[in-house]
């Protein structure tokens, strides 16, 4: 994707891979993909996506016992990422868009428990 002039999509695919590797507790692969995702998010100034992914992946890594990977990301990107997004307030949930059953780009099924909201209308 990055080479085909879709660097933002590439960044999101790296982020998705990082989450999947973290789920399967493959620490080296999760760290590698998270680094790539964060580097691209920062390079392409994806200012809303960067702190949200950073917070989510470091939390997931810590919860899955990948403390070294989480600490590595914090050392490498903590000072660059900026402020972390605040927790979603209950009143803000109603403002989000409706999640379609499948991705409009690729047709993959979407599950609300497996997505990260970038803003009120983008997952």
Image (cartoon, rainbow, N blue to C red):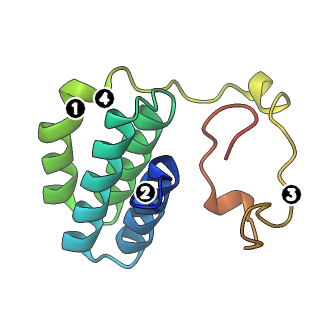
- x 65%, y 32%: residue: 119
Residue 100, disc: 3
Badge 4 marks a residue whose secondary structure is: helix
Point out the frontmost of discs 2 and 1: 2
Residue 78, disc: 1
Badge 3 marks a residue whose secondary structure is: loop
- x 76%, y 63%: residue: 103
| Residue at the outermost front position | 4
Point out the frontmost of discs 1 and 3: 3
Q: Is residue 108 left or right of residue 10?
A: right
Nearer-N-terminus badge (1/3):
1
Q: Which residue is mark 2?
A: 15
- Within 10 Å of disc 4 (Cα), the crowding (few <14, some 14-19, many 20+) is many
Are the two marked residues, 1 and 3, in contact with CB atoms closer than 8 angstroms? no
Residue 3 on image: x %, y %: 39, 60
Between 85 and 63, the one nearer to me in the picture = 85
Residue 20 on image: x %, y %: 44, 71
């Amino acid at each position: 994707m990055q080479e085909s002039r879709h660097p933002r999509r590439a960044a999101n695919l790296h982020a998705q891979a990082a989450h999947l590797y973290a789920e399967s507790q493959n620490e080296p692969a999760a760290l590698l993909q998270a680094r790539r995702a964060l580097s691209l998010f920062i390079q392409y100034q994806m200012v809303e996506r960067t702190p949200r992914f950073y917070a989510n992946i470091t939390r997931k890594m810590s919860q899955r016992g990948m403390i070294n990977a989480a600490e590595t990301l914090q050392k490498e990107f903590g000072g660059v990422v900026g402020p972390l997004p605040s927790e979603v307030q209950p009143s803000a949930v109603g403002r989000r868009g409706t999640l379609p059953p499948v991705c409009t780009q690729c047709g993959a099924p979407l599950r609300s428990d497996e997505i990260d909201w970038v803003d009120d209308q983008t997952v």
